[in-house]
Amino acid sequence: MKPSFHARPVNGPFEDPCVYVRILREKRALLFDLGYMGRLELGNLLKITDVFVTHMHMDHFAGFDTVLRGVLKRDIPLRIFGPENIIQCVEGKLKGYTWNLIKDYPLKIDVFEINEDSISHAGFYAENSFRKAMHPTMIFDGMIKKEPLFKIQGVLLSHQIPVMAYSLEEEFHININKALLTEKELPVGPWLSDLKKAIREGSSDDTIFEVDNKTLSLKDLKEVATITKGQKISYVMDMAPADENIEKIIPFVRGSDILFCEAYFLEKDRDRAEERHHLTAAIAGRIAREANVGSLEIMHFSPKYRHCADELYNEAMREFKG
């Protein structure tokens, strides 16, 4: 199965946690957390359409300026999602600059602040010098964003302050049967993307496709596509090792193909983990095992383990593999 998403950390495990998710076959990417962005080339940065921030501590939010500078003249909107106070924090960042020469720029920034049962929406648009404009509040029922290709869900946790964990899930995956294409004398080409889009959007069976000088309906073509389970990627950072958090996060990340999870401390330093509201590597491994995830990638390590990072990996993997 060719994946729809390719996810990778932007930085090393002792640096700011950020995961960049490229949506393959589209000129588009998603970003989870907004720390140091210096390693992202401008071409990759320009693909970012949606940013999902766990919380606004500096190591998760300091890269806002880098992203803003990169997309400032872009006509594709930038959407930012996060927990309580993210609207205020974005507004504060934007107020740190003078914007008298940008009224002809097309950039629109929409910020979505997620609370227990509602999502507040603020717009900051270059044409108005990024003055805040509030939009109607929406209901939050766990769903943050839904498109034909994927959905983003979130859950509120505690890090002494509210933090968000996120999951990116493909609604279903579409595999193309190349042997059947050959049998039907149909070429591989861009039309297959249109076919997949029509299937995802539930288009009518009589939708017409022009393929290699042939006129075919969606009904004629559906048999070359096989529907399978979609990808799921989850992202969990800066979560206190409290039972309430763990009981929430296990069902939330269940069945993920990959779980990106913090492992800030070793279990031998559990007291320190509780004091600082972070997970241990052992807890990260246990969450992954009990949630039956396919792969666990731990990140966001305390600097105190810089010379013994293997201990964190080994502890997490022992718990994960059981």
Image (spheres, rainbow, N blue to C red):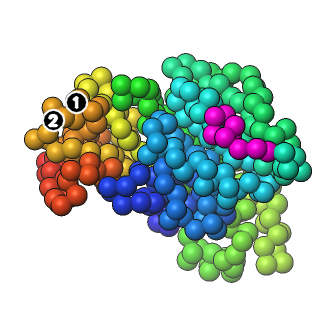
Q: Is residue 10 magenta?
A: no
Badges 2 and 1: C-beta atoms under 8 Å apart? yes
Dot 1 corresponds to which residue? 274
Q: Position of residue 140 (x, y in %)?
A: 58, 24
Left or right of 143 in this view: 1: left
Q: Above or below — where is 78 with respect to 175?
A: above
Q: Which residue does the image show at 47% across and 35% down from the upper left?
A: 55
Q: Which residue is most to the top?
A: 117
Q: What amino acid type should be assigned to the residue bearing mark 2? A: Arg
Q: Which residue does the image show at 62% across and 80% down from the upper left?
A: 182
Q: Which residue does the image show at 33% across and 50% down from the upper left?
A: 300
Left or right of 39 in this view: 268: left
Q: Quadrant of residue 97?
A: top right
Q: What amino acid type should be assigned to the residue bearing mark 1? A: Glu
Residue 270: numbered disc: 2
Give the crowd class for mark 2: few <14, some 14-19, many >=20 residues within 10 Å.
some
Q: Nearer the viewer, residue 204 or 112?
A: 112
Secondary structure found at label 2: helix
**CA distance separating discs 2 and 1:** 6 Å
Secondary structure found at label 1: helix
